[in-house]
Image (cartoon, rainbow, N blue to C red):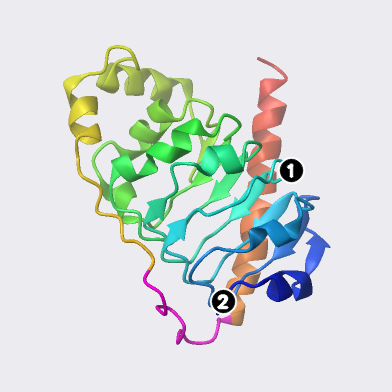
Amino acid sequence: MKLTADLIANSPATLNAIKEYELDLSGNHISHLENLGATRNRFDALNLCNNTVRVLGNFPELPRLQSLYAADNKVSAIDRDLARSLPALHTLVLSDNEIAELVDLEPLRELAELRMLSLANNPVMARPHARLWCVWRMPTLRILDFERVSMAERAEARRLFGSPEDMSSLAKTILDVESTANTFVPGEGLDEPEVDLDKQQSIAELKARIRQEMAQVEAMEQFL
């Protein structure tokens, strides 16, 4: 389905489980992101779960947007300008997508406010040292795949990869890998089966889990 201004205007907009004003575009067979300027920067959160999006990009400047839920898509590529478009983004859920290489995550480095990231069930997380790479490359992260990032992990990541100014040979090798990301093909994804209603429940549970984990991290930080 084409993401039109009419679809945006007629989609549910509610206060979600973590008290964000959210636009729900989930389950619409959307394969390409476009026309999101029609949101007029009115939302704290955008729900794109259960679509067929291949490239996470083509966002206008949305300085209010703080949370992006894009689980259960076909995302294999991330726009290098994502941080410029979404400067306040602190929560990004990309579970159950098709990101394959660690180098494909590089645009996320520029998200200065990114605190919570989920990449569960992406091929990239089966790569050696994937979690430690994310911890090292995205130092603002507090929660990765619903597990708090520990000081021990940060230290181990520095041992493996060095510093941004003095990278280890392993880090350089990872960055030299050529991206295998797929790009959007017009017309693909239009004949997908109907969305399983159980997935709508799983989205609600996902948000509740995010709220719980973030609350625990914030409580711990008060004592540091």
Identify the residue at horizontal 34%, vertical 23% (top origin): 157
Residue 103 falls inside the magenta stretch: no
Q: Which residue is mark 1?
A: 64
Determine the secondary structure under disc 1: loop
Does residue 76 appear to the left or right of 3 in the view shown?
left
Question: In the figure, 149 relative to 169: above or below?
Answer: below
Q: Position of residue 88 (x, y in %)?
A: 66, 37
Q: Position of residue 18 (x, y in %)?
A: 76, 50
One can see residue 147 in this view: no
Tell me, for residue 2, which label it has, or none: 2
Quadrant in which the N terminus appears: bottom right
Residue 61 picture quarter: top right
Does residue 114 appear to the left or right of 14 in the view shown?
left
Question: In the figure, 89 relative to 48: above or below?
Answer: above
Residue 122 picture quarter: bottom left
Query: Which stretch appears magenta?
Result: 185-196
- Residue type at mark 1 is Arg
Identify the residue at horizontal 34%, vertical 18% (top origin): 158
Q: Position of residue 213 (x, y in %)?
A: 63, 41
Identify the residue at horizontal 35%, vertical 61% (top origin): 183
- Residue type at mark 2 is Lys
Determine the secondary structure under disc 2: loop
